[in-house]
Image: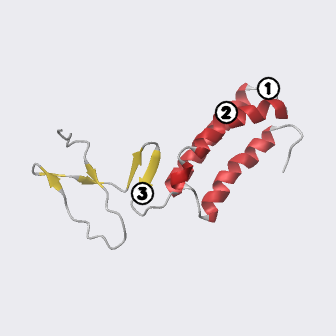
Amino acid sequence: MLFNLDKCEVMHIGYNNLRADYSMDDINLQGVADERDLGAIISEDLKWQKQCSVAVSKAYKLLGMIKRNFSDRSKEAIVPLYKSLVRPHLEYCCQVWSPHYIKDIKLIEGVQCRATKLIHGYRI
């Protein structure tokens, strides 16, 4: 199988990495700090902060879309919309990038807090 050298990149993982230059067919490969694979963003320090922030950003966009387009703000309307539209973005591939830093956990929990503010009569 032939490689597309324009799409080949190198990620140096770890802190004590020598960051050697790699080449294929006398073409130096470009180094990257993070890479998206199967929908999850993997960084060179193996922290999931960028994955959490991207997932939360998508979730907030969807909450805004729900707020703009649905006038019925009852619990019976918002909860199914949240479960079907927002939660999949927060839970996708979470077995791999499960957040363990407090700042990432609070970032994700902020989405649920904002979703409860959409429901009339439910304020935190």
Q: Which one is closest to the eye, mark 3 or mark 1?
A: 3
Distance Cα–Cα, label 3 vs label 2: 29 Å
Residue 112 location, x and y as percent?
Answer: 72, 47
Residue 37 location, x and y as percent?
Answer: 40, 45
> Could you tell me which residue is drawn at 44 percent across and 61 percent down?
46
What's the residue type where badge 2 is placed? Ser
> Could you tell me which residue is drawn at 82 percent across and 38 percent down?
119
Tell me the tag on residue 43: 3
Q: Quadrant of the N terminus?
A: top left
In the rendered structure, which disc, 3 or 2, sits on the residue that comes first in sequence?
Answer: 3
Tell me the tag on residue 84: 2
In the rendered structure, which disc, 3 or 1, sits on the residue that comes first in sequence?
Answer: 3
Q: Which residue is mark 1?
A: 71
Instruction: List the single residue furthest toward the bottom.
Output: 16
- Compared across the picture, whether 54 is left or right of 32 comes to right
Distance Cα–Cα, label 2 vs label 1: 18 Å
Distance Cα–Cα, label 3 vs label 1: 40 Å
What's the residue type where badge 3 is placed? Ser
